[in-house]
Amino acid sequence: MREEKDKAGVFDIAHYPAQRMPSTIIKEDDELIRICELICEFSVHWNYTLNTDNLDTQGESETIDLLNSRLFQPLLRIIELKSSSELGVAAKEQVLAAYKKILPHNFIDTYAEHLINSINSDIRSISYK
């Protein structure tokens, strides 16, 4: 299924809802969905800034590291605490899609690789349930 596709290409455009909508959405899930929407909005604006401000490579790398440690990793911890369901996988896909927008084209760093592996692991564990 998803694992058979190219890992880097699978999540290029990840949008909520997931392929199968969860049967019940609780209040925490609503918060998770809103977090995902905010992440996507941020990534669109950040991508525009990168393309229009002509950041040098060194400055861009430092900025990506800062965003990773201060924004994406804390958000992922929140998502992992709130959900380990299909919705949680969709949320992680959103984080990955947003994170990939701030990376240079066709570049996957160790954080993105870790996130891809985490998503694939979650998909396997959900399918075994």
Image: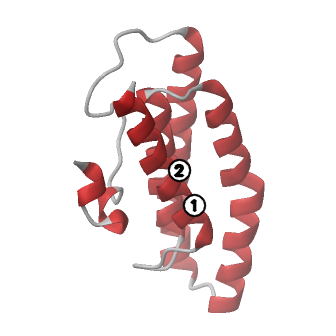
Q: Is residue 40 visible?
A: no
Residue bearing the label numbered 1: 114
Question: Local crowd at mark 2 within 10 Å, few (<14), some, or many (≥20)?
Answer: some
Q: Is residue 99 left or right of residue 73?
A: left
> Extreme front residue here?
128
Q: Residue at x 49, y 74 (%)?
A: 108
* Dot 1: element: helix
Q: Check disc 2 and give the amino acid type.
A: Ser
Numbered circles on residues, count: 2
Q: Who's the residue at 47% across and 57% down the image?
A: 116
Query: Which residue is located at x 57 percent, y 10 percent?
Result: 27
Residue 25 visible somewhere in the drawing: yes
Left or right: residue 27 compared with residue 64: left
How far across and down, in percent of the image, does residue 98 sit?
49, 55
Placement of 86 over or under 43, stated as above or below:
above
Secondary element at tag 2: helix
Work out which quarter of the rendered image holds the C terminus and state it. Answer: top left
Q: Amino acid at mark 1?
A: His
Left or right placement of residue 124 versus residue 67 in this view? left
Q: Are marks 2 and 1 in contact (CB under 8 Å)?
A: yes
Residue 30, numbered label: none
Residue 118 is tagged as: 2
Q: Nearer the viewer, residue 46 or 53?
A: 46
Task: Measuring from the top left, give residue 9's x and y in whole percent.
Answer: 30, 65
Label 2, label 1: how far apart the Cα atoms are: 6 Å
- Which class describes the residues within 10 Å of circle 1: few (<14), some (14-19), or many (20+)? few
Residue 53 place in picture, x, y as percent: 58, 79
Residue at the image position 36 percent from the left and 56 percent from the top:
11
> Quick one: 92 or 44, which is closer to the camera?
92
Q: Is residue 9 above or below residue 75?
A: below
